[in-house]
Amino acid sequence: MRPKYYTPNEVSVHNTLKDLWVSFLGKVYDLTPLCDDYTGDVLLKPVIASAGKDISHWFDKKTKEIRTHVDPTTGCEFPYTPHGRFVHIPPPCPRTDWANDFGRPWWKNDTFCIGILSAKTRYIKIINTLTSQEHIIEVCSEEIMSEILDRYLKWNQHAASYTWKYNGVNLDMAKTLEQNQVMDEDQEFYKLSMNDDEFLPAIHLYFDDDLTEA
C-alpha cells in the first residue's frame, strides 16, 4: 500500500488542541490522541505551540533522537528543549512525580504517523472541458495521478468519469506527473525571474461520453 503524502499547507491547518498535527524528519504525525491523554498537562505547551508546524529542528537528523546539550553547571548531557520541557522528556533532576511507564516516547511511536511530508509540492491547473471550469491545486510531486484525482474530487465528484490528458496525450493514472512528462519547471522560471503562476501546466479533462480530441 502506498503511503499518503501531505503538503506543508495541509499540515498547517491542523493546529488546534482537538486536531493537532506536526511534521518532522519527513513524516507527518497526528498528535491529537497524545493531547487527549495529557489534557491539562503543562508539558503539552511546547507541542501545542508547534501545532501545524514542522519541528525537525527538535531532532538530530542522524540519530532521529531529541537533540541534546551539555549542561554547563553539571557537565551532564540533557535533551535540548529551548521552548520548555515537553511530554515524555525526563526532568533534569530526579523527581518523585516523574513516571517513565509510558512505553515508547511519542516521537518514536509509529501509531501517530499518518503519512509522509512531500519533499516538493507544485501547482497545476485542471481544466474541465465539459464545463469550462478551471481549478489550480497544490499537489505533491511524489503523488501518482490517481492520488491527484482524489484531491480534485472536492471540486468534481465525477472526476473518475473523465479522461485526463496533457498536451493531447492520455495520462497514465498510475504514474506521477513527471513520469507522464508533465515537468516541474518552477526552478527555471525562478532563474529567469518569471512568475510561474502564469505558466502552470494545464491538464484537460474530457468526459468519457464526449471524448473530443484536444
Image: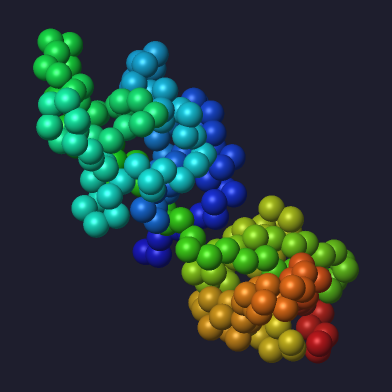
Q: Is residue 21 left or right of residue 89?
A: right
Which residue lies at the image location 21% right of the left edge and 53% below the top edge?
63
Q: Quadrant of residue 178?
A: bottom right
The N terminus sits in image quarter: bottom left
Q: Nearer the viewer, residue 5 or 67?
A: 67
Residue in front for this viewpoint, 150 or 138: 138
**Residue 188 position (above or below residue 196):** below
- Name of the residue lying farthest toward the right: 132
Q: Nearer the viewer, residue 93 or 164?
A: 93
From this view, report whether residue 157 is shown above or below residue 198. Answer: above
Residue 34: x and y in percent read 35, 29
Res 67 seen here = yes
Q: Is residue 129 left or right of residue 66?
A: right
Quarter in which the C terminus is drawn: bottom right
Residue 33 picture quarter? top left
Determine whether, in the image, residue 131 is placed left or right of residue 113. Answer: right
Query: In the orientation shown, which residue stands out farthest toward the top?
Result: 96
Which residue shows up at 23% across the image and 40% down it?
Answer: 68
The residue sitting at 53% across, 28% down in the picture is 16
Residue 151 position, x and y percent, is 62, 58
